[in-house]
Image: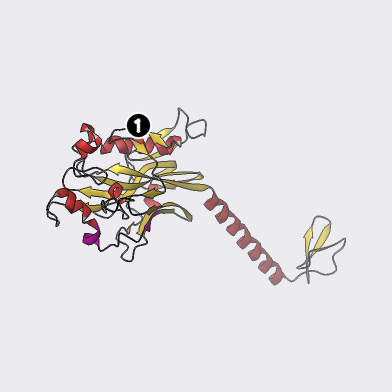
């Protein structure tokens, strides 16, 4: 048993009993060990506090195909606004650029991109959804994100991992550290003079080195989709879309989960969605799958 001085009392270690006088003096080596232990505990506490100080929030959303859609930039801007203002939807409903949080369950048409006009699994988007959609090229699911905290960070340290629970993990991919950069679609924010986020003196970071430290980050997020082209099997373009299961070796009777997870240091945040078969067996196209195709 050793005794450590605290004011006029001495604490018996490790029993933590209090004595009014010092029975003996602990050896110097033991004191060094106790100090080393104390430093280790403090370091762990600081590390835990740092991790807890950063929060990553993720909201999935179906986006127009970035490769071909003229409305994708509008959707991406709405995504940033939604994540920055904690909104469930932003933009004009009934238009391709409308951002809204995806439901927990999706049909396959919501995550198919094409090399010809389509929208949500329909190869005739103009007649199915209206003239505003006739020049769209399908949909990709993105995991929009916001990162906020009491400690600064850099987007260069952000990573992303997508995975799907099907046997082939057809939607899986990873973006390693250094993959992300500040832009109009990944906006860093510095607190202004009032030291508060979300006020008029916030400073936006949309360019420059990705190692710049910021207080928050809001982005349209990474995503993936299954891709269908004119060269794929099928007599019509709708047949080609409906053949997505065969192209990717998937079973339309086996729903699976698509997930996206961001990591920044010790902080993580993500979301998962289930893809299930469309109730109408005639439209096997609107079924289970998710994204692969061209990554973005």
As helix, strand or loop, the secondary structure at mark 1 comes to loop
In terms of depth relative to the viewer, which is nearer, 33 or 161? 161
Residue 206 drawn at (x, y percent): 34, 38
Whether residue 246 appears in magenta in the rendering, the answer is yes
Classify mark 1: residues with Cα within 10 Å, few (<14), some (14-19) or many (20+). Answer: some
Quadrant into which the N terminus falls: bottom right
Up the image or down, 27 lies above or below 139; here it is: below
Can residue 157 be seen in the rendering of this structure? yes
Residue at x 65%, y 65% (from the top left corner): 37
Quick check: 103 left or right of 4? left
Which residue is the site of mark 1?
Answer: 91
Up the image or down, 83 lies above or below 275; here it is: above
Q: Which residues are magenta?
A: 245-260
Can residue 205 be seen in the rendering of this structure? no
Residue 86 drawn at (x, y percent): 46, 37
Quick check: 232 left or right of 63? left
Identify the image's colour scheme: rainbow, by chain, secondary structure or one colour: secondary structure
Residue 137 drawn at (x, y percent): 21, 43
Residue at x 55%, y 55% (from the top left corner): 47
Up the image or down, 145 lies above or below 226; here it is: above
Whether residue 134 appears in magenta in the rendering, the answer is no
Residue at x 25%, y 64% (from the top left corner): 249
Residue 155 drawn at (x, y percent): 38, 48
Total numbered labels placed on residues in the image: 1
Quick check: 117 left or right of 171? left
Residue at x 30%, y 62% (from the top left corner): 251
In terms of depth relative to the viewer, which is nearer, 60 or 174? 60
């Amino acid at each position: 048993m050793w005794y450590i001085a605290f004011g006029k009392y001495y604490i018996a270690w490790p029993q933590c009993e209090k004595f009014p006088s010092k029975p003996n003096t602990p050896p110097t080596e033991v004191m060094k060990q106790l100090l080393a232990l104390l430093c280790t505990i403090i370091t762990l506490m600081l590390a835990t506090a740092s991790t807890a100080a950063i929060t990553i929030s993720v909201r999935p959303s179906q986006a127009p195909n970035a490769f071909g859609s003229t409305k994708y930039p509008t959707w991406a801007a709405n995504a940033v606004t939604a994540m920055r203002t904690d909104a469930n939807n932003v933009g004009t409903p009934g238009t391709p650029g409308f951002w809204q949080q995806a439901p927990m369950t999706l049909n396959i048409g919501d995550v198919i991109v094409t090399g010809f006009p389509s929208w949500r699994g329909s190869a005739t988007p103009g007649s199915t959804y209206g003239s505003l959609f006739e020049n769209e090229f399908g949909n990709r699911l993105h995991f929009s994100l916001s990162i906020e905290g009491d400690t600064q960070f850099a987007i260069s340290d952000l990573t992303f991992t997508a995975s799907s629970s099907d046997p082939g993990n057809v939607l899986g991919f990873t973006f390693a550290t250094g993959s992300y950069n500040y832009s109009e679609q990944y906006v860093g924010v510095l607190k202004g003079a009032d030291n508060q986020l979300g006020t008029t003196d916030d400073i936006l970071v949309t360019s420059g080195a990705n190692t710049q430290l910021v207080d928050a980050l809001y982005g349209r997020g990474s995503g993936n989709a299954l891709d269908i082209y004119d060269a794929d099997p099928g007599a019509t373009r709708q047949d080609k879309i409906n053949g997505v299961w065969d192209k990717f070796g998937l079973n339309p009777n086996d729903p699976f989960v698509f997930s996206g997870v961001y990591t920044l240091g010790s902080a993580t945040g993500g979301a998962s969605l289930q893809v299930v078969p469309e109730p109408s067996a005639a439209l096997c196209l609107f079924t289970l799958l998710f994204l692969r195709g061209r990554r973005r």
